[in-house]
Amino acid sequence: MAGRSSRTAHSVAVLMGGPSAEREVSLSSGRECADALRVAGYQVTEIDLGTARGDEIVRRLTDASPDVVFNALHGRWGEDGCVQGLLDWLNLPYTHSGVLASALAMDKTRAKQAFRAANLPVVESVIADASEVRQRHVIPPPYVVKPNDEGSSVGVYIVHDGANQPPALSPDMPARVMVETYAPGRELTTTVMGDRALEVTEIVTEGWYDYAAKYTVGGSRHVIPADIPDDIRAACLDMAVRAHKALGCTGLTRTDFRWDEARGLDGLIILELNTQPGMTPTSLAPEQAAHAGIDFPALMRWMVEDALCRS
C-alpha cells in the first residue's frame, strides 16, 4: 500500500488512543484534531488503535486508504518511532517527526546527549534501578525521578532538599528510571512550527506541572506571551529551534524550559522536547499558534500539508 503523492490531501486518517499511559489524552487530542480537520475541508477517518499492533494496524490503515496520516498518538508506541517506522514501511505520509527524531526525543537520556552536543543547557542526570532509588538517594536532593521514556509528566516524583527518605516509587514504574537534578524556577515553553518558534508561554500552577495540571481544565494558567525579559524570550525562541534541529525533528514540536530568574540567562535550562504536543482544549501549542494568528483548523491544515511536502 502506498500513500498518494498529491500535494492536496483529501483523506486524512487520525491515529489516536493506543496502549500507552497517555491513551486518554491521545483520544482527546485526536477528536479535537479530527473535528478541526473536517472544518478545514478534509475527509477524516478516526482510528482508535486501542491495543492493536502490527497486522491489525496495517489492516485498518489499508481499509481507510488515506492520503496522509495525522498522528495524534502520545507516549510509547505512538511517539517513540514505532508507529512512524510502520508508516514509513507503508509509504504513508504522516505528521510530526520521523523515526529517529521521535525515538531520540522520547529517550530523555539520548535527547540530553544531543542537546549537550549542540551546546544547549540541561541538568545532570543518571539512570538507576528503581529498586535502588527506593532504597537510597542516588544523587543528593533535591532531585526528580521519572521514566526515561514517557511524557506528559507521567510517573514524576520530586524529592525536595533535606528529604530524609528516598521516594516511594509506585510498583508500575519501569525497572530503570532517570534521576535528575531538580531545576528550580519558572515553567516556560515554546512551540516550533517547521523552522519557526512561535512564542514563549509561562505555565503557572499551584504546584508541580503534572499530568492533572496539564490536562484538567483549570489545572494550570497559561500566560502568553510570558512576562519575561527580552533576552530570556529571545533565548527560549532560539534554543527551541536549535533543540528541534538537534534531534532532527520536523513538523510541530514543543520545548519546555525552567528559568531561575535569580541567575539570569544562566538560569535557563531545557527540560525536554515533545515531538507530539497535546492538542486538547488546554494544550499549549494550539494557544501559541492562535496567538500568532493561526486558528486551529489552519494549524491542522499546515501540519497535513507539511507532511505531504516531506513525503
Image (cartoon, rainbow, N blue to C red):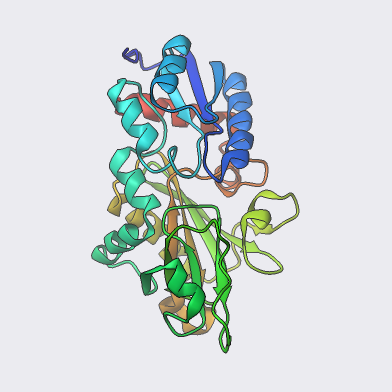
- Picture residue at 35% right of the left edge, 21% below the top: 92
- Percent of width and height locating residue 25: 61, 41
Q: Quadrant of the N terminus?
A: top left
The residue at the far right in this view is 218
The residue at the far left in this view is 117
> Up-down: is 182 above or below 119?
below
Judge by depth and name the residue closer to the eye, 119 or 272. 272
- Picture residue at 49% right of the left edge, 63% below the top: 146
Q: Quadrant of residue 140?
A: bottom left
> Up-down: is 74 above or below 268?
above
- Percent of width and height locating residue 22: 56, 44
Q: Relative to 39, is 263 on the left or the right? A: left
- Picture residue at 49% right of the left edge, 19% below the top: 12
Judge by depth and name the residue closer to the eye, 53 or 117. 53
- Percent of width and height locating residue 100: 28, 43
Q: Relative to 282, is 229 on the left or the right? A: left
